[in-house]
């Protein structure tokens, strides 16, 4: 069994931290906006695996992220594409387009 490094521990902790998650998502939003887009999507932080249910049943981390992003004025929704497998993602949008 290998020993966990500080970097590995930091990565695990950050993946559970709503503030870090929102900061990372907002960096993606900024990059998308700079490209003239009005939507940013991500499957990170459980949105690609743990949100195939009613929103009230989402993991606490996902709920905290949604609350903070919506509080900043973004429209947020988990989208799903159902084919042979289900593809899930968080859509963060701003603007009318």
Image (cartoon, rainbow, N blue to C red):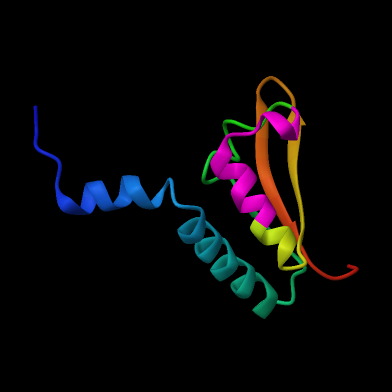
In reply to whether residue 65 is colored magenta, the answer given is yes
Quadrant where the N terminus sits is top left
- Residue 37 left/right relative to 18: right
Corner quadrant of residue 94: bottom right
* Up-down relation of residue 43 to residue 56 (above or below): below
- Residue 91: x percent and y percent? 72, 52
Depth check, front residue: 16 or 39: 16
- Name the magenta segment's main secondary structure: helix
| Residue at (54% x, 43% y) in the render | 61
In reply to whether residue 44 is colored magenta, the answer given is no
Quadrant where the C terminus sits is bottom right
- Residue 22: x percent and y percent? 55, 60
| Residue at (64% x, 44% y) in the render | 63
Depth check, front residue: 16 or 49: 16
> How many numbered badges does the structure rendering display?
0
- Residue 13: x percent and y percent? 34, 48
| Residue at (54% x, 70% y) in the render | 27
Corner quadrant of residue 92: bottom right
| Residue at (44% x, 52% y) in the render | 17
Magenta segment: 54-67
- Residue 24 left/right relative to 52: left
Depth check, front residue: 35 or 73: 73
């Amino acid at each position: 069994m290998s020993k966990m490094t500080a970097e590995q521990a930091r990565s695990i902790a950050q993946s559970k931290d709503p503030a870090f998650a929102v900061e990372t998502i907002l960096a993606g939003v900024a990059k998308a906006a700079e490209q003239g887009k009005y939507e940013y999507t991500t499957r990170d932080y459980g949105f690609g695996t743990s949100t195939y249910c009613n929103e009230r049943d989402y993991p606490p981390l996902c709920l905290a992220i949604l609350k903070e992003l919506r509080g900043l004025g973004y429209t947020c929704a988990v989208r799903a594409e159902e084919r042979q497998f289900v593809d899930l993602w968080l859509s963060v949008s701003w603007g009318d387009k």
